[in-house]
Each structure stands twice: as structure tokens, then as C-alpha cells.
Amino acid sequence: MSFPWAEHYTPKHPAMQWIDEKLPLPRLVYNAVGAGYPVPRNLNYFWNFGVLAGLALVIQIVTGVVMAMHYGANTLVAFSTVEQTMRDVNAGWLMRYAHANGASFFFIVVYLHIFRGLYFGSYKAPREMVWLLGLVIFLLMMATAFMGYVLPWGQMSYWGAKVITGLFGAIPVVGEPIQTWLLGGFAPGNASLNRFFSLHFLLPFVIAAVVILHIWALHIPGSSNPTGVEVKGPQDTVPFHPYYTAKDGFGAGVFLILFAILLFFVPNFLGHPDNYIEANPLSTPAHIVPEWYFWPFYAILRAFTVDFFFVPAKLLGVLAMFASILLLFFLPWLDTSPVRSGNYRPTFKKFFWILVLDVVVLGYCGGAPAEEPYVMISQVAAAYYFAHFLIVLPLISRFEKPLPLPNSITEAVLNRYNIQGEQDALPGMGSDPQPSNAG
Ligand code: HEM
């Protein structure tokens, strides 16, 4: 903890004193999410999504563990045990719908969390490790969601598994043995279902462990904030509790209301109707699509339609799809601007919104049939995606002239509300532009 003015934990109740002496867990909680953790006073609602992602993870684990009690990981019964859970188990329908829609909500919240980081430059020093661990979480989430979708053993489960594991088959020489090894056979079957179930149960706990590291790494420098200017003293922070427990509590309320609307009124809105048909290896669906949260990556995969010399198009697509995520691991070193927040970077801000639009277009094309004009649009959008990170960002970092930064968080807050008197009363608060402040 790098804030010398953080409140120290002094247990009031004798029972708490006793526990804290033997195992300083109350102290840990107090310093992590209690009054002992000073947080910038100007965080906006975009800083709610980390806690909301944690809430989504808890919902997934609780509903998933209950569903596992009624699930049979065998191709002969998997589909019917899921239906049975929906119809015959007390509140089984609720558990299933909450788990399926919970996955979508988890991705919505995490995508907002990632784009918040991209806009406000949260990936920059000294928070690179927070960003890198976040990406590890994201990869684990994708693997978990993919395997979970196979479990109900519907048509999309089966054919999705076939297409995605088939991607590994594109790797020269070792591809096919890898594909067979992953599936435990030549096509998705009982062995695949068993191993996917086992890993789907395990990975959320691995995610939870990486989340702890993610928050640990965050608490070393503390949260960034919408100005991107670092905390300079106690006047720039407020204790996490009660200020941000209240703000996060409000965010959680909105999240739960929206979640309940989806769950109780349109629970199948985000699902695919073909997954209510049991898997049939002899009948290929007309249009195989993954879940919506994979669409941007699926569009990049399908954007490659011609071989490049001796490299087959399919392999190029697979490499580009993995590269589109691996690229993000290098982001802290691709964007070299000393200014963090997009609020003070006029050119960066414009290109940030172009990137958002680009990812939405990729997502739309990934969910559409693999035909024109979607393939051509995917090609242009995929090319822009890579150009954004590899060419545009490094160039902007070099040539952009940032706006003057406030001298401190407090100055930014008080200027916003025109509170001149209070500002004058605070020591060392000039209004000179100081772009180098961001570092
Ligand atoms: C299970 C998924 C995740 C959970 C539970 C989680 C949790 C959190 C929490 C509680 C915070 C502090 C509050 C906030 O800033 O919103 C945070 C901050 C952060 N997270 Fe995550 N996170 C997750 C995934 C990710 C992913 C996928 C990324 C990026 C690839 C990421 C990048 C960051 C960054 C850079 C910060 C620091 C933000 C700042 O202070 O400006 N996180 N995360």
C-alpha cells in the first residue's frame, strides 16, 4: 500500500481483536475494500465494472455449482438432464437461465471494463501488471464459456465444438493430432464432453484466483482515475468504504435490475434456437455461429478467404484471431504517450471511437452468414483493428499535442464545479498546464 495517510485498522470488538491477532483477515479486508483503502475521489461510473465483473463471476459459480448437481456428462443423457433441470428441479429453470444469461452479462461487463481501460489508459505504467492479468482472465473466460456451451449437447454445442476444435487442425503437421487429443477422439463425443465438463467446473476457480492477483496488483499503485493524474495527497482520495461501497452498491442494483429483466421476460433472447435440438452429427445446421461475445473474433477468423503462397487461408484466419488478443498484451508498450486519459488526448479520443465502431462492425459481421458483403466488410474492419494498435496508436503517441492536464485530481474536481474558494484554500494548486504530470 503506497498511501501513508491510509487509516490504520484498530478492531473495536474484542472478538475481532482476537481473530485479528491470530489471523489478520479482518485487517486484510479493511485495507482492501474498507475504510483503510484510499481511492481517488473522482472515479466515475466506468470504475464500477470491475466490481460488477466480480459479481457476475459469483453468480456464475453459484448457479453453475447447483446445475452441476443435476447434470450428466454423457452424450446419451446430457441434453435430457439439462431439460430435466429446467422442468423438474425446483428453481432449476432459474439456475439455468441465470447461468446462460449470466455468461452474457459477464462478457458485457468485462467488455465495458476493457474499453474503460483502453479509453482512460489504465494499461499504462505503473498498472501494466493489472492489465496483463486482466487479459489472462479474459482468455480463461473465453475458454470457460466455449466449453460451457458444449455441455447442453444441442446442435450448436456439437457443431460449435467441431468448428472451434477444427481450427487447431489448420496448424501444419501437429494440427490434427492436437485436435484429436483435445477432443479425445476424431469428433466431439463422450470423451470430449467429460473433459469439457471437468475443465468448465475447474476454470472459474482459476479465474477467481487470478482476479485476486489482479486486485492485488491494482492495490500496489491504487486505482487510476478519469484525469489520469496520479494521487498527490490525502485531499485527492476518499476511503473506499463507505464512498465506493455505496457507489458500487448502486451499480450492482442497476446491474441486477437489468439482469432480472432479461431473465424473467426474454430469457432466450441471446441464445440460439438450434440449441434446443439435441446434437446430431449427421445433420449440419445451415448457419453455425458461436455466442455473440465471440463474434468479433469469429469475423477476424473468417476474414481470410485466400491462401497466401503455401499458407492456407484457414491457418491465416486462426493466427489472426489469436493475434488479435495477444496483441493487447503489448499495448502498454505500443502506446507511449505520457498522458493517460483520453479526456486530454483529442486525436486519440477520435481514434478510440473509431476502434469501438470497428469492433461493433466486426461483431455484426461475425454473427452474419459468411457471404458478401459481410466477408469484405470483415476484411476491412479486421485490417483496421490491427492497424489501430500497430500503426495508429504508436503514431498518435508520438505526434499528438495533449490538452493541459490539471495539477491534481482535487483541482480537476473543484474546477468542474467552479468551487474557487475551496480550491484557494488547498495548498499548491496552481492552474498551469503540466502534461508531464501524467507519467
Ligand atoms: C473476472 C473478470 C475481472 C474482474 C472481477 C476484475 C476486477 C477488477 C476490479 C474490482 C478493479 C478495480 C475497480 C475498477 O477499476 O473497475 C479492476 C481494475 C482494473 N482491471 Fe479488471 N477485472 C476483470 C477483468 C479484467 C480484464 C479482462 C481486463 C483487461 C484486459 C482488466 C483490466 C483492469 C485494469 C487495467 C484495471 C485498473 C483500472 C484503473 O485503475 O484505471 N480487468 N478490475
Image (spheres, rainbow, N blue to C red):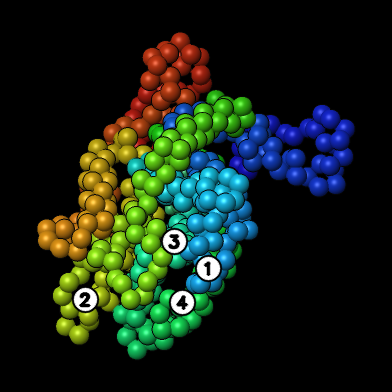
Q: Which residue is mark 2?
A: 313
Q: Earlier in the sequence, mark 4 or mark 1?
A: 1
Q: Earlier in the sequence, mark 3 or mark 4?
A: 3
Callout 4, which amino acid? Answer: Gly
Which image quarter holds the N terminus?
Answer: top right
- SS for dot 1: loop
Q: Residues within 10 Å of mark 2 (few under 14, many from 20)?
A: some
> Residue at point 17% right, 78% down?
307
Callout 3, which amino acid? Answer: Tyr
- Observer-nearest residue: 52 or 348? 52
Callout 1, which amino acid? Answer: Val
Q: CA distance from mark 2 to mark 1?
A: 38 Å
* Mark whose residue sits in front, 2 or 1: 1
- SS for dot 4: loop
Q: Which residue is mark 1?
A: 77
Q: Can residue 384 be seen from the camera position used here? A: no
Q: Residues within 10 Å of mark 3 (few under 14, many from 20)?
A: many
Residue extending farthest to the top is 421
* Mark whose residue sits in front, 4 or 1: 1
Q: Residue 296 at what x, y percent from top left?
A: 29, 56
Q: Which residue is mark 3?
A: 149
> Residue at point 74% right, 34% down?
9
Callout 2, which amino acid? Answer: Ala
Q: Earlier in the sequence, mark 2 or mark 1?
A: 1
Q: CA distance from mark 4 to mark 2?
A: 28 Å
Kindly indicate the quadrant of the structure image that contains residue 16.
top right
Q: Earlier in the sequence, mark 3 or mark 2?
A: 3
Using the image, determine if residue 277 lies above or below residue 353: below
Q: Which residue is mark 4?
A: 189
- SS for dot 2: helix
